[in-house]
Amino acid sequence: MPNDRLYDPPKVGGDVLDSCSRCKVDLAHVIVSMVSGRPARVMCKTCKSLHNYRLGNRVASRTSSRPSAPRVARVTVRAADYWDEKMATKKNMPAVPYSPKATFSLGQVIQHPNFGLGFVEEVKLASKIVVMFRQGEKILIHSMS
């Protein structure tokens, strides 16, 4: 009589297919413990790591009748591209040399000795500003008299 199942019914010491947390692949595991007739802890036959049995939970969640939330496309913008776009609108504004003693306002263009040209994106409490430079955002101090 041919057996069409890959593995026998689960039992302690038996084999089961599971996703190994160390190998990052679905592999054969040995069942170490069971709870309510289902594998609870397994040991990977390849790397010998012990972990909770996961595949049973993952399969169940895939077949759920619950509708899934629509996926939102993630849009990423490089800091340099964002900086170029914003600086194009501020090309007529004069750049003010950065000094911790000077006070800056939102949207003001700053010339920093190390980071170069930037603009104030946010004025934070406690005398701090967020400045967008070509290489990314930096938090700087201002109004320190």
Image (tube, grey):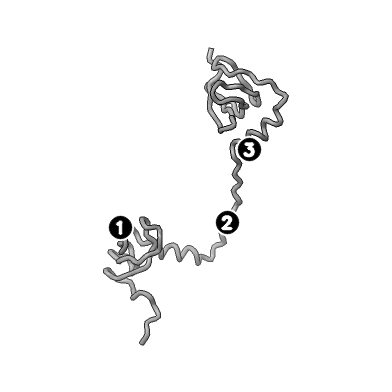
Q: Residue at x 63, y 37 (%)?
A: 81
User: From the viewer's perspective, is residue 43 above or below residue 107?
Assistant: below
Nearest to N terminus: mark 3 or mark 1: 1
Labels 2 and 3 touching (C-beta < 8 A) = no
Mark pair 2, 3: CA separation: 31 Å
Nearest to N terminus: mark 2 or mark 3: 2
Q: Nearer the viewer, residue 13 or 132?
A: 132
Name the spot of residue 109 as percent of width and height, x first: 64, 24
User: Which quarter of the figure has residue 36?
Assistant: bottom left
Mark pair 2, 1: CA separation: 34 Å
Outermost bottom residue:
1
Q: Which residue bears the numbered disc 3? A: 81
Nearest to N terminus: mark 2 or mark 1: 1
User: From the viewer's perspective, is residue 101 above or below residue 109?
Assistant: above
Q: SS for tag 3? A: helix
Residue 66's disc number? none
User: Which quarter of the figure has residue 143?
Assistant: top right
Q: Please name the amino acid that badge 1 sits on.
A: Ser
Q: Which of 23 and 69 is in front in this view?
A: 23
Q: Which residue is drawn at 32% across and 62% down?
A: 46
Labels 3 and 1 touching (C-beta < 8 A) = no
Please give the count of numbered marks on the rendered protein: 3
Q: SS for tag 1? A: loop
Residue 69's disc number? 2
Please give left or right for residue 126 compared with residue 41 in the image: right
- Sort mark 1 into few (<14), some (14-19) or many (20+) by Cα contacts within 10 Å: some
Q: Which residue bears the numbered disc 1? A: 49
Name the spot of residue 127 as percent of width and height, x first: 54, 21
- Sort mark 2 into few (<14), some (14-19) or many (20+) by Cα contacts within 10 Å: few
Q: Please name the amino acid that badge 3 sits on.
A: Asp
Name the spot of residue 25 as percent of width and height, x first: 40, 61
Please give left or right for residue 58 compared with residue 144 in the image: left
